[in-house]
Image (cartoon, helix red, strand yellow):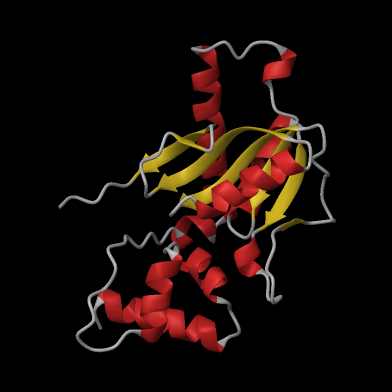
Amino acid sequence: MSALEELITKAKALQAGGHTPGQISDELGLSMETVTWLLTQQKGMEAPKDVHIDWAAVGSHGVLLNDMAMMMLKRFLYLAEGSAIRAVDDLPDTVVGIAPSGAPLATLIAAEEGLKLAVYLPAKHSRSETPTGSLSGTFSTITGQRCIIVDDVVKTGTTLSETIAFLRQHGATPMAVWALFDKRGVREVDGVPVHSLFVISRLG
């Protein structure tokens, strides 16, 4: 079975298990356009240009996941050493993890730094007729907070824009986005800097 055939099988299995296209997009690290193609593709149709990132070997192991979270944190601290981030007002209060995969990374970073933790539930995970994003009521509120946004993969930037807008609408200040992988090669989204450990470029 080819890698593409495996992806089609995985996508359809997740759909059969009750996952929404948005959830499948997060599970497979693919854009919504690619997921739609995987679920509905017909012979002869050209696949969208995308890159599949499978980091389950790290994400499924607590120690390795913690190592990745600490790498994200250290990258920010190294950036801070060479910038004007010195005053208390320049430091974050809250780490906002984008569910599902950003939440465990955000939890580990918040615990290490003694920060508050919030979890954002993107609109694409909603099953309502008018899907909207929301903040999980189990974790911290964000009003008046300086926030770092954490996610695993920057795909199209749509979810990041949605999250940034939500934070601003609710009185928070998004300071930066931290991600493991960036498939767009962006430096900022809606005026918020993006810091990724790995930038993935497609040649040709």
Tell me which residue sits at (35%, 63%) in the image.
Answer: 52
Quadrant in which residue 172 is drawn? top right
Tell me which residue sits at (29%, 81%) in the image.
Answer: 5
Q: Is residue 183 above or below residue 110?
A: below
- Residue in front for this viewpoint, 19 or 193: 193
- Residue in front for this viewpoint, 60 or 116: 116
Tell me which residue sits at (41%, 83%) in the image.
Answer: 39
The image position of residue 8, as x and y in percent, is 36, 81
Q: Is residue 107 visible?
A: no
Q: How many marks?
A: 0
Q: Is residue 158 above or below residue 189?
A: below
The image position of residue 47, as x and y in percent, is 26, 73
Looking at the image, which residue sits at the far left? 204
134 lies left or right of 8:
right
The image position of residue 194, as x and y in percent, is 49, 35
Q: Is residue 102 above or below residue 169?
A: below
Tell me which residue sits at (50%, 35%) in the image.
Answer: 71
Q: Is residue 95 visible?
A: yes
The image position of residue 137, as x and y in percent, is 84, 56
Q: Is residue 172 above or below residue 104?
A: above
